[in-house]
Image (tube, rainbow, N blue to C red):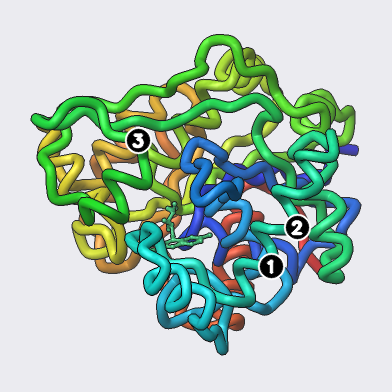
Amino acid sequence: MSGKHVLALSGGVGGAKLAAGLAAVLAPEDLTVVVNTGDDFEHLGLTICPDIDSVTYALAGLNDTVRGWGVKDETWQAMAMLRGLGEADWFNLGDRDMGMHIARSWRLREGETLSQVTARLTRNLGIAHAIIPMSDAPLRTQVETAEGWLDFQRYFVAEQCRPVATGVRFEGSPGAAMSPAFAEALAREDLGAIVLCPSNPYLSVDPILAVDGVREALSARKVPLVAVSPLVGGTSLKGPLAKLLGELGRPVSNASIADHYGDLLDHLVIDEADAADAGDLQARGLCVTVTGTVMCDAEVRERLARVALTAARIETG
Ligand code: FO1
């Protein structure tokens, strides 16, 4: 019998939605979600892990679906106080969200690893599925611009992705080892498939591939690797992917997503608005599924999760 454990690799907002869909259709023992930590940074004395937060809030049903990040029904009193005190206010920390960063920072300072802290906090929020940081070591995404190399959140939030990007690098790679549960998931005898969530390939998935040994392990895998494209109608729904592709001199199309993942990819799930891309992708030897990929509610998230799992030859009930 082929394995049925699914390893999903996810960034923040879009990835978190599919991760929530996968968690809705797979039992906790059948899913491991490994999350990008290249966006993490230290801010106001706190360790912020935005993509872990997004996946955690999505699986806990706490995510703000309008803003796309942070906690729903959020209030901003602490932020107003910080602003009044003359502290940095370019990165918005809601009151409820702040509790997450305080708990994480406190436990890290007490000596727990990021994996241990994440397991503790997700469990205490009632999440049964495994949400795993890609590494317990710092691996930081930086974007090259005319102003020099910018740390990810400086580029993404403070500069609103305005500077023209000429390169991306991952400080700490090589040298960052896989988190223990990531390595275990990749080595599982019952591993049945790998799913790349619809996250930015350059900014959210590449940091995971830059962790020591990950690209090699994925190349050597014996199970299907399915990606859900983050492009919809030839552009990115949210975030800088379309702008970044243009700046890096690549077409804003699914051909660029397929080129980027290269031999790693077996099957690409693309949006129905991009159905015209299917022929070219198939001509390269890729399997393609065309479906609606805009995850506007829980029902669509689950449906897309089932489509991705079917593409990966994983049975769902
Ligand atoms: N994104 C923003 O655009 N502006 C913010 O002020 C902001 C604050 C923030 C706080 C906590 C958190 O977990 C995420 C936050 N994000 C914010 C989202 C985050 O910058 C990005 O969505 C991810 O890093 C990209 O995946």
Disc 3 to disc 1, C-alpha distance:
24 Å
The reply to whether callout 2 and callout 1 are in contact (CB within 8 Å) is: yes
Give x and y (percent) for residue 190: 87, 35
Q: Is residue 143 left or right of residue 121?
A: left
Give x and y (percent) for residue 204: 45, 41
Q: Is residue 151 left or right of residue 162?
A: right
Residue sitting farthest toward the bottom: 73
Q: Residues within 10 Å of mark 2 (few under 14, many from 20)?
A: some
What label sits on residue 184 in the rendered view? Answer: none
Q: Residue at x 68, y 18 (%)?
A: 177
Mark 3 or mark 1, earlier in chain: 1
What residue did someone put label 1 on?
A: 99
Does residue 285 appear in this view? no
Q: Residue at x 41, y 29 (%)?
A: 261
Q: Residues within 10 Å of mark 3 (few under 14, many from 20)?
A: many
Q: Residue at x 82, y 66 (%)?
A: 127
